[in-house]
Amino acid sequence: MKYLSISLVIMLSLLGFNSCIHDDFEEPEIPDMPAGNVITISDLRQIYMDSVISGVHSEGYKFTENFSVYCTCTMDDKSGNIYKSAYVQDNTDAINLHLLSSGGIYEGDSIRLDVKGLILSDYENMLQLDSVHVDHNIMKIATQQYLEPELVTIPQIQTGNYQGKLVLIEKVQFEDASLGDTWADAENLETLNHNIEDCNGNTIIVRTSGYADFAGRTIPEGKGSLVAIVGQFRDDWQLAVRNMYEVDMEGYRCGTPLYEENFDGVVNGEAIALDAWKNIAIEGNVLWMGMNTQTLTAARITPNSDLVQQTWLITPQIEIPEGIVPALEFETRAAFDLGGTLKVFVSEDYDGGDDPSTATWIELSATICDAPSNNFGTWTESGLISLADYSDSIHIAFRYDGTDTQKTQYFIDKILVSMD
């Protein structure tokens, strides 16, 4: 009977509890967000120029009326790389939102932003809307409306036209000084700057917070692409990475050699006969000769009195890995110029035989040295010559043309075919 009484009490209690449950939930209060006039982020930038930069409101322009901006969030603070902040973008421009509290707006959120009460200003030249209250200033329209990043180069970013925008940068790598380091100091929660560079030597800062969830990851060693938001701090342009899924840098680094020849193995004063090279006199009997002294190794051609002279110096076959864009560079020097010429060519169908005329040769646009008429000139770099049109295997040829009266002595050195 005692246990029966306890059971009855429990059953009655449960019935009483269930009687309190109902389906009529109280609706949360929806903030009053009058749409007002609709403006764009480009309009915000113009207001900033007209009011803040002009000095009328030097501390920032505070909106006292309802204006709405329709835009999409391109970066939130979930990863920890930014804090109490978000970036938004429309089809005109982009801007940073400085939030009163963290969270509440997420990447891919399509929103209507009510700017009433917000302050339009800059932090060290980075344009921002300050004091954004997620509940009072933001109305979500849709989620997962992700924007595609815009493909740009480092020099394009440095024009200043991409502040706050979501961008994709390709064919870049972290500088040598950053290799082996981490994105940030995760142990001491300190922000670090690392430079990325393209193959032309243009650089830009990648800035990462010590609170980022990838702060302790090791900097990638290869070349590739990354997606990021463009920021500015004073006169420095910076990139903020959203996550590691948008970093793909596993390719060959800029300048990784596919083939190189410095002529260290030539015999001084003898015709060049390096392994798999071709040294062919089509007209006359002048050959490319080795120069190997205590101070210099190079290939050299010295014309003679033959009526017509045409001599080819052709590299071995150079294999181009799939997906790689190669580039060529070398150095030349000349002396005693009387009109002989040196040109450089590339071929995909040369068979490695003794008659280069049976192949198709394309002349490359290279910087060839100038030469004085009665002395030696200076070494001249060819510049980086793109071989982007060639993706299988190639030969590079250096062709000298002259006569008994039109002749020039040429030197070639430091031939390098590398990853562009």
Image (tube, rainbow, N blue to C red):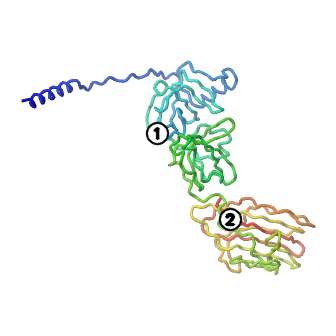
Residue type of the residue flagged with mark 1? Gln
Q: Position of residue 264 (x, y in %)?
A: 75, 72
Q: Position of residue 385 (x, y in %)?
A: 71, 60
Q: Secondary structure at mark 1?
A: loop
Residue 357 shows in this picture? no
Instruction: Provide the residue designation for mark 1.
Output: 145
Q: At x 62% / y 69%, what residue is drawn?
A: 319
Of the numbered discs 2 and 1, the one sitting upstream in the chain is 1
Q: Position of residue 137 (x, y in %)?
A: 49, 25
- Residue closer to the observer: 285 or 241: 241
Instruction: Give left or right: position of 212 versus 25.
Output: right
Classify residue 157 by image quadrant: top right
Q: Quadrant of the C terminus?
A: bottom right
Classify residue 235 by image quadrant: top right
Work out how far the residue at label 2 is from the one at label 1, CA to CA, in angstroms.
44 Å
Q: Residue 417, labelled with which disc? A: 2
411 w.r.t. 239: above or below: below
Residue type of the residue flagged with mark 2? Val
Q: Residue 30, labelled with which disc? A: none
- Residue closer to the observer: 79 or 406: 79
300 w.r.t. 122: above or below: below
Residue 77 shows in this picture? yes
